[in-house]
Amino acid sequence: MKRALIPGTFDPITSGHFDVIARASQLFDEIIVAPAASIKKSPLFTLEQRVALIEEATRDLPCVKVASFDGLLVDFAKEMGATAVVKGLRAITDFEYEFQMTAMNYQLSPELETVFIMSPPQYMYLSSSIVREIAQMGGNVEQFVPACVNRALKEKYATK
Ligand code: COA
């Protein structure tokens, strides 16, 4: 069985993330979407909320599972029996950062393959922080996030 990990902070999952997950699910037998605790980023959504939103957004993709982690990606991949990491590549600005992480992960675990899936044009400039900013200022993010995330953002900012 070919199992791949899709790591990220997912604060929150966007349509761009979903696109990568859906396309990767055509290439691997099992996908584990892995939200990292990412405490340094001070996420808006708790880890439990991020897990729940990813689960709801991907519930129609049977080969997708969700499991959070809080350590080294290469260790978690080993623990999960994943042989590949899938990452989305958006604009050229992603390249330097992804290049560095892939090179370091390769040094730590050469048998773990990293696979990049290019974002389609409509998601090239999408990011979780830009979605949060638009939602916080009352803008409509419906086209950029799964429906459950749209609801969660409205609730979050209504109570803030
Ligand atoms: N669509 C929309 N947005 C996307 C995207 C896509 N396809 N791909 C990436 N993004 C956005 C994310 O929303 C995020 O936006 P934000 O900064 O506005 O929140 C940004 O791009 C960065 O995303 P990502 O590359 O997933 O990084 P991350 O910081 O969310 O997560 C980890 C990075 C968790 C994968 C990485 O830090 C890690 O592996 N941590 C574990 C510790 C470790 O092993 N460290 C050593 C690594 S060498």
Image (spheres, grey):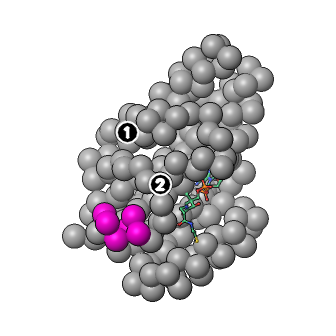
Residue beneath disc 1: 55
Determine which quarter of the picture holds residue 30: bottom left
Q: Left of 109 or right of it: where is 129?
A: right
The structure residue drawn at horizontal position 22% and vertical position 70%, both measured from the top left corner, is: 1
Residue 105, position in %: x, y?
Answer: 53, 77
Q: Which residues are magenta?
A: 75-80
Q: Is residue 75 left or right of residue 117?
A: left
> Which residue is depicted at the point 54% across and 24% down?
152
Residue neighbourhood size for the residue with mark 1, other residues' Cα within 10 Å, grouped as few (<14), some (14–19), many (≥20): some
Q: Earlier in the sequence, mark 2 or mark 1?
A: 1
User: What residue lies at 36% left-to-right and 56% top-to-bottom?
Assistant: 32
Q: Which residue is mark 2?
A: 70
Nearer the camera: disc 2 or disc 1: 2
Residue occupying the far top of the picture: 159
Disc 2 marks a residue whose amino acid type is Asp
Instruction: Give the camera-side residue of 128 and 140.
Output: 128
**Distance of label 2 from label 1 (alpha carbons):** 18 Å
24 or 46, which is in the foreground? Answer: 46
Mark 1 secondary-structure assignment = helix
Viewport quadrant of the C terminus: top right
- Element carrying mark 2: loop
Q: Residues within 10 Å of mark 2 (few under 14, many from 20)?
A: few
The residue positioned farthest toward the left in the image shown: 1
Q: Which quadrant contains ligand 1? A: bottom right
57 and 68: which one is in front? Answer: 68
Residue 31, quarter of picture: bottom left
Confirm whether the magenta stretch covers residue 77.
Answer: yes
Give, as a three-letter code, the residue at label 1. Glu
The tally of labels here is 2
Q: Residue 9 vs residue 82: left or right?
A: right
Q: Is residue 144 visible?
A: no
Q: Position of residue 146 (x, y in %)?
A: 51, 34
